[in-house]
Each structure stands twice: as structure tokens, then as C-alpha cells.
Amino acid sequence: MQNDHPSRKHPAHGVLFVDGQRTIIFDTVCTKYRKPWLANDEVHALLREVWHDATAWLMGRYIILPDHIHLFAGATNETDIEYDNWVTYWKSQFSKRHKNREHRWLTDHWDRRIRNAVSYDVKSEYVRCNAVRHGLVENPEEWPFQGEINELRWD
């Protein structure tokens, strides 16, 4: 049997916009070599600042784990910057402001367009419980490095 979906070493990118449908992306962004430097107050505060300033896409709910971030981003009515460029932009802005050369991002990221409300709810629950799955806390609410910049609603 031929494998129509061979294992990919790099994710496919490009956001499909559908008329009349909300465009929300679920993404995973990792540190280079999966080094665990993200989950601390300083990084959390700086990421929130950068995401707030990077307005080409709306940052929604997110969780910051030691070596990766899960996030939702939504297109605005004026979005004319490609999603990949926006991710590159906020990562570069973070790196410029953070100024720790040892703290580097993996060049790529793993994004997926959310296609319906059920998928959005499933991924939202996945994000909410991620720190528990990684054994970092017992209850999702205990993890301090999570939040929401903009409320992204499916409806």
C-alpha cells in the first residue's frame, strides 16, 4: 500500500481563506534544540508585549511550556500579511528585545487552520490541559504561563 502522506520533516504552510468563515490558526512554535527556556515570568511578559504589538494577526489563547508554545491566531479584516511572515516578525521582535543569544527559536513552526467550531473547542481543551499532560501541574489553572491576548470566537 502506497503512503499518500509520507512523514514530513518540515510542515506545509499557507493559510487558506474561506469567504464567510473565520480564519483561526492553531500553531506550535518550538525553541531551537527544544531547550527549555520559555516558561518564566520575564519571557511570558515579553511575549505578551510583542504579541500585543504585532497586530497584523490577533493573538488569541496560548500556553507557554518550557520548550514550546501552543497558540491560536486569528485574521483581522485588514490582514494582508501572510501568517508565516507574522510568526517570523514576532519571533524576531522577541529576540531583539530579549537579547539572550542562547535563547533561540526553531526556524519553522507547525500551524493548522481550524475548520469548524468543534475542532476549535477540541484544540482549546488540548491547550488548556497541556501543562498537566507534561506533568508540570496537577490542574490546568495552576500553570502561570498561559493566557489570552484577544478573544477569538468561532461564531
Image (spheres, rainbow, N blue to C red):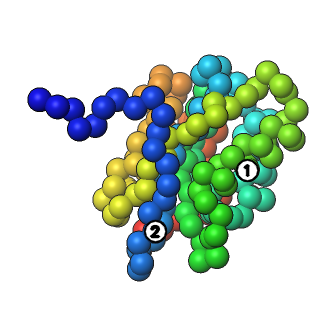
Tell which residue pokes out farthest to the front in this image. Answer: 2
Q: Residue at x 21, y 32 (%)?
A: 3
* Residue 141 against residue 32 in the figure, above or below: below
Tell which residue pokes out farthest to the left in this image. Answer: 1
In terms of secondary structure, where does tag 2 sit? loop
Q: Amino acid at mark 2?
A: Phe
Quick check: 24 left or right of 68?
left
What's the CA distance linking mark 2 and mark 1? 21 Å
Q: What residue is shown with label 1?
A: 89
Badge 2 crowding class, 10 Å Cα cut-off, few under 14, some 14 to 19, many 20 or more, is few
Q: In which quadrant of the rendered image does the C terminus lie?
A: bottom left
Tell which residue pokes out farthest to the bottom in this image. Answer: 20
Quick check: 132 left or right of 60?
left
Q: Amino acid at mark 1?
A: Tyr
Q: Quadrant of residue 133?
A: top left
* Residue 49 against residue 109 in the figure, above or below: below
Q: Residue at x 86, y 40 (%)?
A: 96
Q: Residue 58's mark?
A: none
Q: Position of residue 144 (x, y in %)?
A: 63, 38
Q: Position of residue 55 (x, y in %)?
A: 71, 64
Q: Residue at x 59, y 77 (%)?
A: 77
Residue 116 makes an appearance in the image: yes
Q: What residue is shown with label 2?
A: 17
Asked if the residue under mark 1 is in contact with the one under mark 2, i.e. CB atoms within 8 Å, the reply is no
Q: Position of residue 111 (x, y in %)?
A: 49, 47
Residue 39 makes an appearance in the image: no
Q: Earlier in the sequence, mark 2 or mark 1?
A: 2
In terms of secondary structure, where does tag 1 sit? helix
Q: How many marks?
A: 2
* Residue 123 against residue 40 in the figure, above or below: below
Q: In which quadrant of the rendered image does the N terminus lie?
A: top left
The front one of 45 and 8 is 8
